[in-house]
Image (cartoon, coloured by chain):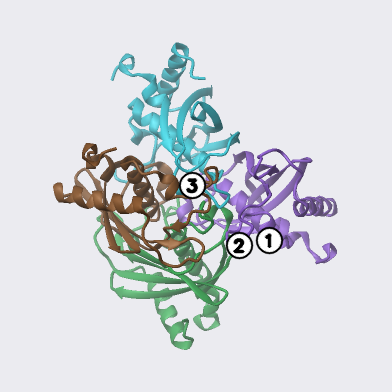
Chain colours: A cyan, B brown, C green, D purple
Amino acid sequence: MSLSSLNPDDWLCLKRIVRFGETDAAGVMHFHHLLRWCHEAWEESLDNYGLNASNIFPDVTLNTRDLEVALPIIHCEAKYKFPIKRGDRLDIKILPKKIDLNSFEVVTMFDCKGVNVARGILRHLSINAKTRKRCDLPESIEFWLEASSIARGLQPLI
Amino acid sequence: MSLSSLNPDDWLCLKRIVRFGETDAAGVMHFHHLLRWCHEAWEESLDNYGLNASNIFPDVTLNTRDLEVALPIIHCEAKYKFPIKRGDRLDIKILPKKIDLNSFEVVTMFDCKGVNVARGILRHLSINAKTRKRCDLPESIEFWLEASSIARGLQPLI
Amino acid sequence: MSLSSLNPDDWLCLKRIVRFGETDAAGVMHFHHLLRWCHEAWEESLDNYGLNASNIFPDVTLNTRDLEVALPIIHCEAKYKFPIKRGDRLDIKILPKKIDLNSFEVVTMFDCKGVNVARGILRHLSINAKTRKRCDLPESIEFWLEASSIARGLQPLI
Amino acid sequence: MSLSSLNPDDWLCLKRIVRFGETDAAGVMHFHHLLRWCHEAWEESLDNYGLNASNIFPDVTLNTRDLEVALPIIHCEAKYKFPIKRGDRLDIKILPKKIDLNSFEVVTMFDCKGVNVARGILRHLSINAKTRKRCDLPESIEFWLEASSIARGLQPLI
């Protein structure tokens, strides 16, 4: 895979349709699903970028159950600007950002018909899975962060 | 929309990638997500077939909050044959079947790399949303059931 | 812990209040949560009976991450008789049953104000976690199954 | 109900046991469940305080489906300090705070064995459910906010 052959739209711009089970009795999306969507968008971005996910997520069948590095979420937040409804077709933009040697955050923007309806942020810390002490980010995550930084330079995402 | 222009593969054959939050500490998909996937696959099928979902699902902003007909699930079941893991790319086949004037069921097959890994069934009853008595299936659901029956005649799905 | 000192009501009869996020835009409990409740009720029953859960569930900090035996769910089903709403106080009865040397099922009855509103069934298989071949049920599960069988003899649960 | 007869411990201090389906393949609680727990703790607090929830949450069977006032969440956030595992018995403290005439927030502290493991914040806006314009908080929420403020004066919660 050469970086130049990848269109950032494929791994930084995603889509999602809101489903019935994600609404509540008020008739709109129940708030906590948005944070789940953020994590799933992050995973989809890594997939689409071409990362080998077995270095990032524990896999019981690939002898990567006990990964050296874990990337737990230490902080998350979300802002809700407009109600989101079943059937809404969301345009999702991922804005990853390295914070320091041991952590990064991913801002996820959710638009519907050209209007920003919500935003979520997940902050990950890189730790040694055994000692649970801070460690350097995995190399593959470094690549992905750098590539997204370059992509953002090429085309403003917001 | 003319039926003949629709390829059944677009609304009876779907795809889904398993996400990290859908696993549990045993390292594989936690069982109850499969039933959620069944419902979401059903919704996606209706979308792709071209149904006006505001006749099927309550919509707080479209004056369809209080639909005449509701389609509650009265029975569901699932069989799990092989463990399903994060990153698995599932091929999903929808097999709808009319049971009688008031009810239908949707069998959903989940394959991974050509192997059937799980199966779910949702059975819906058609009721008057106010009296909660049985009533005829909505016309749009009848169309979708009939079209899927024809499609299955054309190409065996399993 | 002596079996005689345990009141079956403590570990076979549980309670749960339905929460807002468990409803959907139709105003009632979204169906798939019931299966989650079944599993959580099973876990609560094991806890209340006094089982050492680190023999049953993988625990990353107790060196039981790689348990010898796993108890995956191979089948589940549910029947829905009446709509369940936010705030409903559910009385939950657990009816465990050994099927054979390698499997058991748990029927979970959900009542609201004395009326049965739904029922769920989870069927577990006992497998060697590495070979994934059938094996005998863990001893602690055998005890729990036997105790529930005795308890049911003493007091009819339905 | 007289306020003086209520022990704040009953409606500001709650308990919860972490369940298997709330973990992920890393072996610990998957982050987004914490936000769900915050909302459920808020609901439990209102219940235990004695509020008539049919004024707060839409109820399809009580003619409160179309409530005048809705309390959507406009912001949420969470901090994770220590991993949370299946079986962990969490002590939950609710700290409600009025922000202005139209909004309030609820800080929820999660402790395990005397150690703070996580914290969540939900911020609600009070809006007219039809016009979706800001409006005064419902009276019952005002009472609950005031009572919690008094309770906190009596006994420091953190």
Q: Residue flagged by tag 3: what amino acid is it?
A: Glu
Please rate how many residues cluster around mark 2, counting C-alpha atoms within 10 Å: few if below 14, some from 14 to 19, many from 20.
Answer: some
Q: Mark 2–mark 1 contact, CB under 8 Å? A: yes
Disc 3 secondary structure class: helix
Q: Are marks 3 and 2 in contact (CB under 8 Å)?
A: no
Q: Secondary structure at mark 1?
A: helix
Q: Nearer the viewer, residue D30 or A101?
A: D30
To which residue does mark 1 refer?
D47
Specify whether B133 is left or right of A54: right
Q: Residue at x 43, y 34 (%)?
A: A41
C108 to D84, vertically: above or below = below
Q: Is residue D98 left or right of residue C142?
A: right
**With respect to residue A30, does A14 lie above or below?**
above
Q: Nearer the viewer, mark 1 or mark 3?
A: 3
Q: Is residue D54 left or right of residue C3?
A: right
Residue type at tag 1:
Asp
Residue A22 - label = 3
Q: CA distance from mark 2 to mark 1?
A: 8 Å
The numbered mark 3 sits on a residue in which chain? Answer: A
Residue at 45% x, 48% y is: A20
Q: Residue at x 34, y 47 (%)?
A: B41
Q: Indicate whether D1 appears above or below A120.
A: below
At 31% from the left and 69% from the top, the residue drawn is C103
